[in-house]
Image (spheres, rainbow, N blue to C red):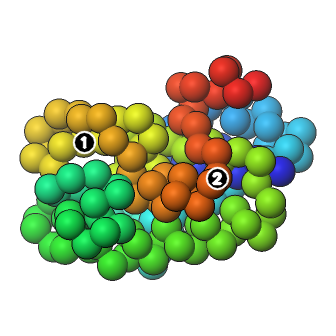
Amino acid sequence: MILVSSCLAGLNVRYNGTNCLDNKIQKLIDEKLALTVCPELLGGFSIPREPAEIVGGNGEDVLDGKAKVVEKSGKDVTELYVKGAYETLKKAQEVKASVVVLKEYSPSCGSSMIYNGEFKDKKIAGNGVTTALLKRNGINVVSEERLDDFL
Ligand code: SF4
C-alpha cells in the first residue's frame, strides 16, 4: 500500500482550507493503491489553522529537541507536530506502506525543501518533522515532485 498526503489527494486539509490536488496521486487513490494521511490533523490541528514553519533547524532537529515548530503569530506548536509525526508513523506501519508520498515544502511533509522559519517565503534543504521520523524508521518517503522516479 502507498500512503499519500491528504492534500495531494484533493482533500481540503491545508492550513488555509485548500488542497494541492495532484492528478497522479488521485489516480493512485482511484485505483485503490493508496490511502491518505494528514500528519497535522492527526497531531490535533483543525482547519483552518495558522501557517507554521520550523525555526532553528529541520525536522530531525525538531525530533531531537534542538528546533521548534512555530506559528506565524509566534505560538510554539512543536508538540502537536511531533504527535502528528508519530501518529503517521503508526499508520504507515499498520498499512505496511511501501512508500509514503508527502507534500514538498511543508513543515510536516517536506522531504527535500522546507521553509526557513522566517515566514518570508524562503526555502532551505531539509525534511519536515513527519518525513524525518518516517525516514529514521526506515520508511521510504518521496515528494509528489519525485513520484515519477518511484512509479
Ligand atoms: S502538507 Fe501534510 S500536513 Fe500539510 S495539509 Fe498536506 S498532508 Fe496535511
Q: Is residue 47 shown above or below 23?
A: below
Q: Which residue is mark 1?
A: 115
User: Three-letter amino acid code at disc 1?
Assistant: Tyr
Spatial separation of the CA atoms under disc 1 and disc 2: 23 Å
Residue 80 lies, in percent from the top left, at 37, 76
Residue at 88%, 46% (x, y): give it.
32
- What is the number of the mark on residue 43? none
The residue depicted at 33 percent of the width and 78 percent of the height is 79
Please provide percent x and percent y for residue 93: 73, 66
Q: Secondary structure at mark 1?
A: strand
Q: Earlier in the sequence, mark 1 or mark 2?
A: 1
The residue where tag 2 is placed is 139
Q: Residues within 10 Å of mark 1 (few under 14, many from 20)?
A: many
101 shown above or below 1: above
Residue 142 in which image quadrant: top right
Give yes or no for contact between labels 1 and 2 (Cβ–Cβ under 8 Å).
no
Give the left or right position of residue 2, taking residue 41 as reference: right
